Image: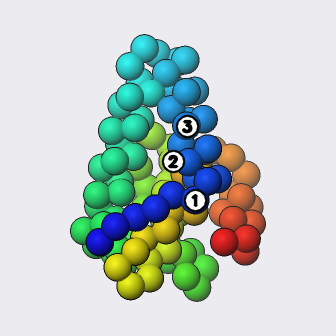
């Protein structure tokens, strides 16, 4: 199974990694490693994570307060967001409506 990131998710990922790197040297790389681990879990078990909306699911990071918002169709996973859980919770609802 393969995955792709929508441009908005790619931007959120880069922004979060940059933020954590500014907090502590190397922390941005640790954030990226955690993202890779989350995506690996999703690819292994795409239906195993909490459903949000009719087509989307979310998988939580273990160490950081973030979630990957995604949908799975056939053999492809589409990542629609890398969402901070400290932000307005309505961002997930808006993203689901727009993707």
Give percent across and percent down for residue 97: 72, 74
Along the polypeptide, which appears first: circle 1 or circle 2? 1
Q: Would you place residue 84 above or below residue 70 in this image?
A: above
Residue at x 57% of width, y 27% of height: 19
Q: Would you place residue 25 above or below residue 12 in this image?
A: above
Along the polypeptide, which appears first: circle 3 or circle 1? 1
Q: Colour scheme used in the picture?
A: rainbow
Residue at x 43% of width, y 56% of height: 60
Give percent across and percent down for residue 54: 58, 85
Identify the disc placed on residue 29: none
State the separation of the CA atoms marked 3 and 1: 13 Å
Residue corresponding to mark 3: 14
Is residue 50 among the parts visible in the rendering?
A: no
Along the polypeptide, which appears first: circle 2 or circle 3? 3
SS under mark 1: loop
- Residue extending farthest to the top is 25
Q: Nearer the viewer, mark 2 or mark 3?
A: 3
């Amino acid at each position: 199974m393969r995955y792709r990131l929508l441009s908005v998710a790619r931007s959120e990922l880069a922004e979060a990694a940059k933020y954590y790197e500014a907090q502590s040297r190397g922390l941005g790389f640790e954030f990226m490693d955690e993202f890779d681990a989350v995506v690996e879990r999703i690819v292994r078990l795409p239906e195993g994570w909490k459903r949000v909306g009719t087509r989307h699911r979310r998988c939580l990071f273990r160490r950081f307060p973030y979630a990957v918002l995604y949908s799975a169709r056939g053999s492809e996973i589409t990542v629609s967001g890398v969402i901070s859980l400290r932000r307005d919770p309505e961002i997930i609802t808006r993203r689901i409506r727009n993707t």
